[in-house]
Image (tube, helix red, strand yellow):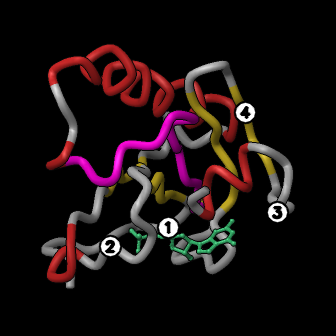
Amino acid sequence: MTLFEKIAAGQIPAQIVDRTPDWIAFHDIQPQAPVHVLIVPIRPIARVGAALPEDAGVLGQLLLAVGQVARKLGVDQSGFRVVINHGQDGGETVPHLHLHLLAGRPLSWPPG
Ligand code: 5GP
């Protein structure tokens, strides 16, 4: 099981924000902004570039989850950033697709 499968199964504790049968959202253990939530498909996809055509439905659900979670946390008006890291140069450390939702402060551009 991946780390995030263990969180989804309740085997590793996490501060859960929201969940559906398709995805779970929980606070990042090492937040990089006042709001830093990970949105993760329950059924693991290794990384975004490894997604297959049959994953299209859940990929859409993950993007829809962004707005739902942002509204729930009250950051939809102030704004936020969504990041997906793919592979070594992208900064991926957990091989289970996840969207980072970052908010609560102005975020600089370009990213580091
Ligand atoms: P990546 O670097 O793969 O894009 O992001 C992985 C994220 O998972 C990091 O931001 C890291 O802080 C977070 N993370 C790693 N281990 C845990 C954990 O056990 N619990 C939670 N909530 N987040 C974790």
Rate crowding at label 4 as few (under 14), some (14 to 19) or many (20 or more) other CA atoms within 10 Å: some
Q: Give the SS element for disc 4.
A: strand
Tell whether 102 sits left or right of 29.
left
* Residues marked 1 and 3 touching at CB (< 8 Å): no
In the rendered image, residue 56, in percent from the top left (x then y), is placed at: 25, 19
CA separation in Å, label 2 and label 1: 23 Å
- The question of residue 47 being in magenta is answered with yes
Tell whether 95 sits left or right of 26.
left
The residue under the point 49% across, 67% down is: 105
* Residue at the disc numbered 4: 18
In the picture, residue 3 is in which quadrant?
bottom right
In the rendered image, residue 83, in percent from the top left (x then y), is placed at: 31, 57
Quick one: quadrant of the C terminus?
bottom left
* Residue at the disc numbered 3: 12
Q: Earlier in the sequence, mark 3 or mark 2?
A: 3
**Mark 1 lies within 8 Å of ligand 1 (Cβ measured):** no
* Residue at the disc numbered 2: 92
**Mark 2 lies within 8 Å of ligand 1 (Cβ measured):** yes
* Residue at the disc numbered 1: 105
Disc 4 marks which amino acid?
A: Asp
Q: Earlier in the sequence, mark 1 or mark 3?
A: 3
Say which of marks 1 and 3 sits in front: 3
Q: Earlier in the sequence, mark 2 or mark 1?
A: 2
Looking at the picture, tell me which residue is in the foreground, 57 or 100: 57
Where is 36 relative to 101, above or below?
below
Rate crowding at label 2 as few (under 14), some (14 to 19) or many (20 or more) other CA atoms within 10 Å: some
Residue interval drawn in magenta: 36-48
State the count of labels. Answer: 4
Disc 1 marks which amino acid?
A: Arg
